[in-house]
Image (cartoon, helix red, strand yellow):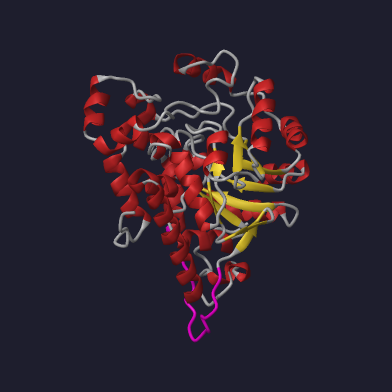
């Protein structure tokens, strides 16, 4: 295990990941759609929110422990579903799931992962994890995907609602993104500068979309995958599909991609267990508000009938605390996790979680609290944070 004690913030991990991960895959993770305005706002809007420092408060006995959909968690943070995670680092999803299990937080596997549902179950001793699913035209494939998630001991299903069609990400087009990488001269030159990544990939058999290739009809290899994917995301997705997924799954259901108070009320009516305020990391509708800006109005609209979480722009424990103060019962991290993974594999993911928890714990104490479950907007300086 490398000594990562000098890695003190998520930005340290980002810089190292950018150096170690091939350009096309680093850019895939670290980019937004069109002007990337919403992607940048997800981070920058957190910085405008100021904290109230309190003194002469007993800071002993602090805890960041809480629950998310009834599951005990070491802090109100889960790893978000991220596509192509296994291209940031060989066997990336497996490593992320193992780090999350050891730390005591939930891990969410994406449908568009490199490692399969079965891979995660096998390498974590069938420890419960969450699975993210899209509604696709091939409903038989979705049925079988849900059955596989049940068999793998997944404890919650996360349904992504904001990817009926793909937002355009300029960097992916310019890089000719593919898995495995297309052997263009530019990509080969770039790969030659990433020997650590290349050696890792040579040592694994997992280089494709493990949940799809060999499982979807007509998709036996990568050559047939791209056309299948382009055709499968269903633009007709509606709340009736949410009801169908809920009945078909039968367990905890989390809806990801809520950015409007009206949709929050519809999410409550759907009977889902949690909703995630998320703009897909700024990768879909550029020009949408940041997740943290949208959070208060959605939390107010949802009330107490559903757990409200948020995803987007979290790079520190302070961000987690601010989200909690504005009504998020839990948060999810995508890029912060991927930076750690790309930099140092499983050890990097663990380090990212350690950094976030320590920042959360210390900042909470400076704001006069010792229990994360008692934090509310009173820790924030009036006039600096969004309201409902």
Is there any visible trace of residue 48 in the rendered image? no
Does 132 appear in magenta? Answer: no
On the rendered image, what quadrant is the N terminus found in? bottom left
Which residue appears at 27% of the width and 25% of the height? 187
Q: Position of residue 25 (x, y in %)?
A: 36, 33
Q: Which residues are magenta?
A: 47-63
Q: How many marks?
A: 0
Is there any visible trace of residue 40 in the rendered image? yes
Relative to 347, say whether 31 is above or below. above
Which residue appears at 75% of the width and 33% of the height? 248
Relative to 76, say whether 371 is above or below. below
Q: Quadrant of residue 194?
A: top left
Q: Position of residue 170 (x, y in %)?
A: 38, 29
Can you name the residue that lies furthest to the bottom here?
56
Which residue appears at 53% of the width and 69% of the height? 382
Q: Position of residue 92 (x, y in %)?
A: 43, 40
Horizontal placement of 207 versus 123: left or right? left
Horizontal placement of 226 versus 274: left or right? left
Q: Position of residue 188 (x, y in %)?
A: 25, 24
Does 51 appear in magenta? Answer: yes
On the rendered image, what quadrant is the C terminus found in? bottom right
Horizontal placement of 264 versus 289: left or right? right
Which residue appears at 43% of the width and 58% of the height? 316
Q: What secondary structure is the stretch in magenta mostly built from?
A: loop
Closer to the camera, 165 or 20? 20
């Amino acid at each position: 295990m490398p000594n990562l004690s000098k890695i003190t913030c998520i930005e340290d991990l980002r810089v190292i990941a950018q150096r170690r991960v091939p350009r096309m895959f680093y850019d895939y993770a670290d980019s937004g759609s069109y002007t990337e305005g919403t992607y940048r706002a997800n981070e920058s809007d957190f910085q405008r929110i100021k904290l109230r420092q309190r003194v002469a408060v007993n800071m002993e006995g602090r805890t960041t422990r809480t629950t998310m959909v009834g599951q005990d968690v070491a802090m109100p943070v889960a790893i978000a579903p991220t596509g192509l995670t296994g291209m940031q680092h060989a066997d990336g999803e497996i490593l992320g799931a193992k780090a999350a299990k050891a730390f005591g937080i939930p891990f969410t596997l994406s449908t568009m992962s490199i490692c399969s549902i079965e891979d995660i179950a096998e390498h974590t001793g069938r420890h419960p994890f969450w699975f993210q699913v899209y509604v696709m035209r091939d409903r038989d494939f979705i049925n079988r995907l849900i059955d596989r998630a049940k068999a793998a001991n997944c404890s919650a299903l996360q349904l992504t609602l904001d990817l009926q069609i793909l937002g355009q990400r300029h960097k992916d087009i310019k890089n000719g993104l593919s898995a495995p990488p297309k052997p263009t001269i530019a990509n080969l030159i770039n790969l030659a500068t990433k020997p650590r990544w290349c050696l890792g990939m040579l040592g694994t058999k997992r280089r494709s979309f493990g949940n799809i290739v060999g499982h979807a009809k007509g998709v036996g290899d990568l050559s047939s995958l791209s056309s299948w994917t382009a055709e499968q995301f269903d633009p007709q997705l509606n709340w009736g599909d949410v009801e169908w997924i809920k009945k078909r799954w039968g367990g905890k259901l989390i809806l990801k991609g809520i950015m409007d108070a009206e949709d929050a009320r519809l999410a409550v009516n759907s009977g889902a267990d949690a909703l995630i305020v998320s703009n897909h990391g700024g990768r879909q509708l550029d020009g949408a508000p940041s997740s943290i800006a949208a959070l208060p109005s959605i939390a107010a609209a949802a009330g107490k009938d559903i757990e409200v979480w948020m995803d987007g722009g979290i790079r520190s424990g302070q961000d987690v605390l601010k989200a909690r103060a504005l009504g998020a019962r839990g948060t999810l991290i995508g890029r912060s996790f991927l930076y750690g993974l790309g930099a140092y594999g499983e050890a990097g993911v663990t380090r990212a979680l350690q950094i976030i928890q320590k920042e959360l714990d210390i900042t909470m104490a400076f704001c006069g609290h010792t229990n994360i479950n008692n934090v509310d907007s009173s820790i924030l300086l009036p006039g600096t944070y969004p309201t409902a």
